Amino acid sequence: MATIVLMPFHWAADMNASFALARKLQNRGHRIVYLTIPDTEDRIRAQGFDWLPVFNQVFPKGELEKQSASEIQGKAYGPAEFKARLRGMCELLRNNEIGRATEVIRPDLLLVSSGMPWVGIAACKTAIPVIQFSSTLISVEDWSVPPFRTNLVPDGSLLSHIRILLAWKKLFLRRRFRNRAWDISSELKSLARDCGFPRNKIDFAVETWPRLLLPELVFCPKDLDFPRHKVREAFFVEASIDLQRKDASFPWSRLDQHRPVVLCALGSLLATKAAPKVSRFFQMFLDAIRERPALQAVVAIGGALKPEEFDCPANALLVSHAPQLELLKRCAVMVGHGGFSSVKECIFMGVPMLLVPLSYDEPGNAARVVHHKIGVRLQLEDASALTLGSCMDTLLENEVYRENIRRMSQQFVEIEKRSPACQIIENTLAGRTIT
């Protein structure tokens, strides 16, 4: 069978989704090797996969911990720091970093995160087939689908189309005049020229990093997305939920078997980058839970916050990290920020959501949850113990949300079992056309 190299971004969303796919491919007889920065080695090996280092000079071991510590102290990681790393990676890629790192294992296929288009550009230089994968929804200019940083929910009307078009125009104008510091177009054009990657295979009319027009697995069934026109080279596949993922330990004995569980989590990145804002939100949630003794709550506060900082009621349990998938099996509701991985995991487990979107793709993810009536959303400025409690009551009492998410859960589970991603990968290995 084939040797397949996976190159996810170091964020949890990319890593977790890649683990699910890697296990499926491994079970089908393929050899899986991860090629990532040194700080991810322990996590990858803990999941049982082989690992090789890449970009050591730019990301020496301990670099991510150092960045996290700085952000906790209020020293933001900005565009200057990011571009310095990007240019360092591009220089290594020009000097055959991928070929050097993989020459011993001789891979048959590279699976590269679309969150690192610079890697995808240089990967094509190796002459090894390349497939991208995305752990977020694709956000490309489309008159029927709004940018995922907006709260817009399309309804198919002319007014809706106009609002969406204006949102796209506003996004590109803001990028041109206000957010130029984060623009990496020139770096990618330069790298593409040096690596012989066709310029016409880079789409710059997207919301995030430029998108490479290479085959791309989007880890999301179409059932969750808004109806859209066909996106070039994009294949919507399973959610890639890793049910065998090894997560944090948890004091299960402290949960009451007879009370519904509400899980509250805002993701690992947000708790580090915006600790004061996150702390206030958690306290509002705890105050809402205190008024509902028939419920019990688990709150994953992250490593930057401490339990003693909160006024915690008896029916709530504070932990730094929680085994989210296992907890969702017992949850009646999840309260979160709308991170894409958490949204997909809630759907898979059939758990209605209360989402308070804060940044990046979270508004668009929450808009889709609202559109399908599998949860409700609340803007942060409207959040209080009263409003959070009222929204939780709605989800617990209104059968519509539970029935809708039950149906979508069945669809997610069926697609996960069928695993179209594996079929696409094996067709590529066999030299067959992907459709």
Image (cartoon, grey):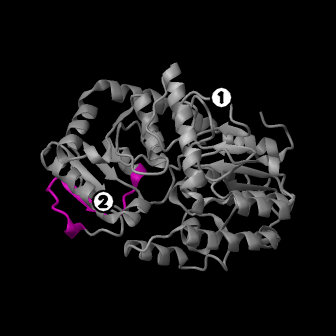
Q: Could you say which is closer to the camera, residue 48 or residue 269? A: 269
Q: Mark on residue 277?
A: 2
42 relative position to 118: left or right: left
Give the vertical position of 89 relative to 205 (above or below): below
Q: Is residue 358 above or below residue 420?
A: below
Rendering quarter of residue 319? bottom left
Identify the residue at horizontal 53%, vertical 20% (top origin). 158
Residue 136 visible somewhere in the drawing:
no
Q: Quadrant of residue 87?
A: bottom right
Query: Magenta stretch containing residue 321, yes or no?
Result: yes
In this image, 107 relative to 140: left or right? right
Which residue corresponds to the image point at 30% horizontal and 68% vertical from the top-left? 305
| Residue under the image location 20 percent in, 69 percent down | 308
Inspect this view and state whether residue 6 appears: yes
User: Alpha-carbon distance for marks 1 and 2?
Assistant: 37 Å
Q: How far from the left and from the top, in percent, is residue 193?
A: 84, 61
The amino acid at mark 2 is Lys
